Amino acid sequence: MDNSKTLYDKIIDAHTVRQLDGSGQILLYIDRTILNEYTSPQAFSGLREAGRKVWNPAAALMVVDHVNPTAAHRTRTMPDDGAARQVEYFGENARDFGIELFDILDARQGIEHVVAPEQGLVMPGMVVAAGDSHTTAYGALGALGFGIGTSDIEHYLATQTLVYRRLKTMRISIDGPMPLGVTAKDVVMEVIRRIGADGATGYAVEFAGDTIATMSVEGRMTICTMIVEAGARGAVIAADQKVLDYIEGRPRAPKGDLWAQARRAWLALKTDPDAVFDREITLRAEEVAPMVTWGTSPDQAATVNGRVPALDEETDPVRRRAMTRALGYMGLEPGMPLEAVAISHAFIGSCTNSRIEDLRDAARVLRGRRVADGVRAMIVPGSTQVRHQAEAEGLDRIFIEAGFEWRQSGCSMCLAMNDDILQPGDRCASSTNRNFEGRQGPGARTHLMSPAMVAAAAVAGHLADVRDFA
């Protein structure tokens, strides 16, 4: 009997408390959660109403990131009364249930999916569940992360477990060197374009191949974060020496003998050579070019030197209707060159692309250049620590001299829940992860791309090929 297993199955098996009779579901142990002020209030209210405590407060961290302002001068003042109450209640819950809180003025504050890895809270083999779909980011560290709803958050807090249904497995193998101007964001956008916005629905995705092996841990985080836009409910990449180097020495990482034991175990945790996946996808990195989205779904994308697709290129009637609606919302005409699309805003930020490597990529494009007239450009680092590191490297001066606003950390214009909101008709080159209608503000139009591509567009005043700025 073949006992070969995928990395996903090994992690799930190690965390299975028991099989739930007749349901096809399991009771799954969860190692850790990260809570934000937007998705957790109802869960805490449920605990209060039932008179329940949090089972293991030390296994949770609370971070303010969704609704806080990101203006250059940070204060506790919220953009509106609703946001103020959310943050206030968040603090009350942290105090009453004994959970650690990184509040607005904490030096460790930032976007939850940036903060958790930089604090060393996520380690290979863990299962992390949190109230945000982009919890898949932690797959880059050899952990399994996935988003959960409010009722599941309450269940987790009360029991340290979740009712879980095992996913199908998919391996996406990417090989070959990445061409000039191509980043991890372009690679995952090309994957999503090929398999579709529902192409990974019902799957846990493992990324493999020599392109992934040579990619930085931060690049892998971008890929694992973004694959949820293809419907994936989990993502994993086997831990290697790069992951160990990333984790070692971080505040919450193991130390001494425990580190030595963990290191051996983590390097051994990988998919067995003969393991079979439910679906296999392969991609050559040489085939990838700098990407932008033209529509209102992450799979509605093309290479930046391409054109808006013609409707007759799509034979599927459902997809053609989606294209028609998207082009109407985006104000684009089939066949027009993407580089002819003028922008009014440029935004670099989000859990997908706001880490120090992302900012360095943008700075290389912006050094000695200026943002085009009529473009408002903003950079929102992923955490206060990322902001401080960028300032130590002098990146902030490059951004400011180029005409970008250098702001404080938070989710910001990724989902427009604070005062960083686009107006109807505004068009934004954005390093975020979603371009749905109204995502950055009602009537706003979003083009997804890498941070370097956002920088190029900001300078050009229109969608632009970063390879022209080398």
Image: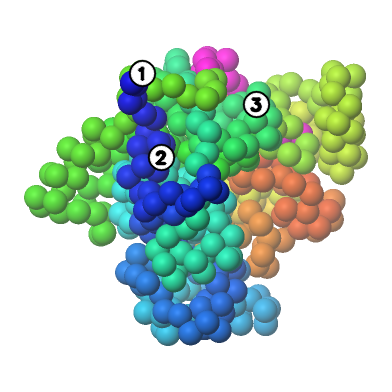
Tell me where residue 110 appears, x and y as whole percent. Answer: 46, 62
Q: Is residue 335 above or below residue 65?
A: above
- Percent x, y of residue 7: 37, 33
Which quarter of the figure is the N terminus placed in? top left
- Tell me which label, 2 or 3, sits earlier in the chain: 2
Name the kind of residue labelled 3 in the image: Ile
Residue at point 34%, 70% (across, down): 56
**For the residue carrying disc 2, how many other residues have a C-alpha within 10 Å: few (<14), some (14-19), or many (20+)?**
many
Q: Are marks 2 and 3 in contact (CB under 8 Å)?
A: no
Q: CA distance from mark 1 to mark 3?
A: 25 Å
Q: Quadrant location of residue 190?
A: top right
**Disc 1: which residue:** 274
Q: Which residues are magenta?
A: 282-294
Residue at image location 51% in from the left, 73% down from the top: 74
User: x, y (%) of residue 354?
Assistant: 50, 49
Q: Which residue is mark 2?
A: 140
The first of marks 2 and 1 along the sequence is 2
Q: Which mark is drawn over residue 195?
A: 3
Q: Secondary structure at mark 3?
A: helix
Of labels 1 and 3, the one closer to you: 1
How far is disc 2 from disc 1 in space, using C-alphas? Answer: 22 Å
Q: Earlier in the sequence, mark 1 or mark 3?
A: 3
Image location (x, y in percent) of residue 137: 47, 45
